[in-house]
Image (cartoon, rainbow, N blue to C red):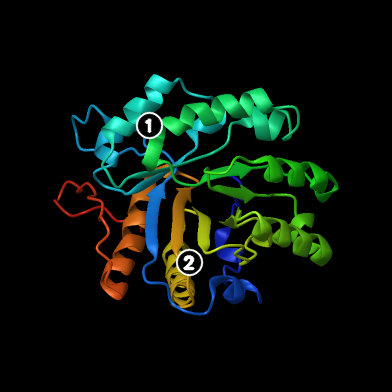
Amino acid sequence: MNFGKVDNPETIDFTLPDTHISTNDILGKQQAENCNVYVGCAKWNKQDLKGFYPRGTKDELRYYATQFNSIELNATFYRTFPTDTVEKWYQKTTSDFKFFPKINQSISQFNRLQNCEAELNGYLDSIAHLQEKLGTIFLQMHPTFAPNKFDVLTNFIQQWPTGFPLAVELRHTDWYNDTIVANELYALFEENNISNIIVDTAGRRDLIHMKLTNKDAFIRYNGANHESDYSRLDDWFDRIKLWIENGLENLYFFVHQNLETESPLLSKYFIEKFNNELGYDLMVPSLPNDKKGNELTLF
């Protein structure tokens, strides 16, 4: 994910903003019985995750699903897949695996949420074949989709079919830097149980709003291929730990890199923090060794 990429990440202040004042009210201020944690990458193909797959791996998705419990499925942004392909994805993955697919660009980018009933129905009919392995679907709008289209967004959300959890990522800065607009947006999301996606990327610090609109945290983390990627994950872990203590029920955390090759390393680091510090028993991905037999590291 090159969105928000900068040439000099060492110049960026990556300090996480304070949690939005109303987030703890949404969470309930009381720890839930269990918080479901899903951490994964954005892609499973070998071309992007070079070096992650053991030599001779023939089925990348089948192997990926033995290493992670989830995938942010960006492939569905570019095309709506035939049902037999989606059914194969289902069959190749473990029983507890979840897919988090992006809504097709014909709906979000080309039609801008209008006059796209046929496209949306086709998309939903396709991904519905993931059955219980279908996680939250996410809608990502173009940066030029601004608050003057609030009525369009409202209509789309209010017409969204029940039974398909939805998260929304808005990239035009005025959705968040205009307090009146932001509060109306948050109210819309809360009333319709829509997850408000948080984007953490170097060049767009305005999108790290720290406002949850239900008891799910859907976070898209974009590392900068810089040593600060680890300390940023440390900060995220500390923040999520507090949210769990206050009632967070589901965490969906997807790791990107400007060079995706390194995403599994960061994901493993983050997963191990949950296991070691919070007593989780999450699947820890195996990473390849260098020529000396040592596991590869990022820096």
Q: Position of residue 82 (x, y in %)?
A: 45, 20
Residue 18 visible, this angle: no
Q: Which mark is residue 194?
A: none
Is 90 above or below relative to 260?
above
- Badge 2 local density, few (<14 within 10 Å), some, or many (20+)? some
Three-letter code for the amino acid on which mark 1 is drawn:
Gln
Seen at 17% across and 46% down, the residue is 291
Mark 1 and mark 2 in contact? Answer it, CB < 8 Å. no
Seen at 22% across and 50% down, the residue is 286
The part of the image, by quadrant, that contains residue 178 is bottom right
Element marked by disc 1? loop
Q: Farthest residue to the right: give it.
A: 148
- Badge 1 local density, few (<14 within 10 Å), some, or many (20+)? few
**172 or 163: which is nearer to us?**
163
Q: CA distance from mark 1 to mark 2?
A: 26 Å
In primary-sequence order, the first of circles 1 and 2 is 1
Left/right placement of residue 143 relative to residue 259 reads: right
Q: Position of residue 231 (x, y in %)?
A: 44, 69
Three-letter code for the amino acid on which mark 2 is drawn:
Arg
Q: Position of residue 154 (x, y in %)?
A: 75, 47
Q: Farthest residue to the left: give it.
A: 293
The part of the image, by quadrant, that contains residue 160 is top right
Q: Position of residue 238 (x, y in %)?
A: 44, 75
> Which residue corresponds to mark 2?
232
Left/right placement of residue 140 relative to residue 298 reads: right
**19 or 269: which is nearer to us?**
19
Seen at 82% across and 45% down, the residue is 151
> Which residue corresponds to mark 1?
47
